[in-house]
Amino acid sequence: MIQELVESKKETGTSSLSRSDTLKFIQIVEEQKIAVSLAMQKRCQAERITNPIQIQLLMQNEKTKTFDKLRIEHGVSEDDLQNGVKEHKLNDDPEFKALLMQIQAKARQLQ
């Protein structure tokens, strides 16, 4: 039953997220990326991890954890966010662009 719902959602390519929810969850994910990036920098320095492949795998693991947490806490998947961006045409939206620029500025301040 669950698999059927997942498949039907994939086939329609639509998001059940409103525009405001899509923006809210993207903000959550992007802010989490900043926190993870800073934590990973500290971890790699502390553990003297220099192998780029190992660092990339650690980052991918953290990305997966972020989306798992989002799914568990809010019932929202990475596909839902991608569909929401497409459905609401956020790539052309000034508010969306401003949000991303604000998050990038915050990331630069923290580094």
Image (cartoon, rainbow, N blue to C red):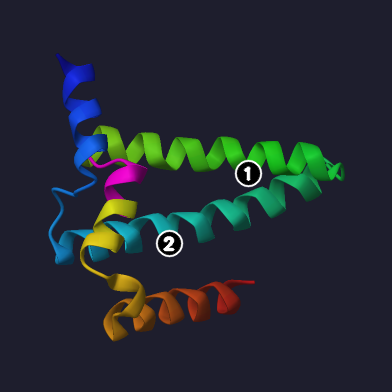
Kindly identify the residue that appears in the image at 54 percent across and 40 percent down: 62
**Residue located at (19% from left, 49% from top):** 15
Q: Residue at x 25, y 42 (%)?
A: 76
Relative image position of residue 20 (x, y in whole percent): 16, 66
* Residue type marked 2: Glu
The N terminus is located in which quarter? top left
Q: Position of residue 59 (x, y in %)?
A: 63, 44
Amino acid marked by disc 1:
Met
Q: Secondary structure at mark 1?
A: helix
Q: Secondary structure at mark 2?
A: helix
Q: Which mark is residue 31?
A: 2
Q: Is residue 79 magenta?
A: yes
Mark 1 sits on what residue?
59
Disc 2, disc 1: CB below 8 Å? no
At a point 61% along the width and 58% down the height, the residue shown is: 38
Q: Position of residue 2 (x, y in %)?
A: 18, 18
The answer to whether 31 appears left or right of 104 in the picture is left
Residue 86 - label: none
Read off the magenta span: 75-81
Quadrant where the C terminus lies?
A: bottom right
Mark 2 neighbour density, 10 Å: few (under 14) some (14–19) many (20 or more)? some
Residue 107 figure quarter: bottom right
In the displayed structure, would residue 102 be above or below residue 89?
A: below
Quarter-of-image position of residue 66: top left
Q: Who comes first in sequence, dot 2 or dot 1?
A: 2
Q: Position of residue 11 (x, y in %)?
A: 24, 36
Number of marks present in the image shown: 2
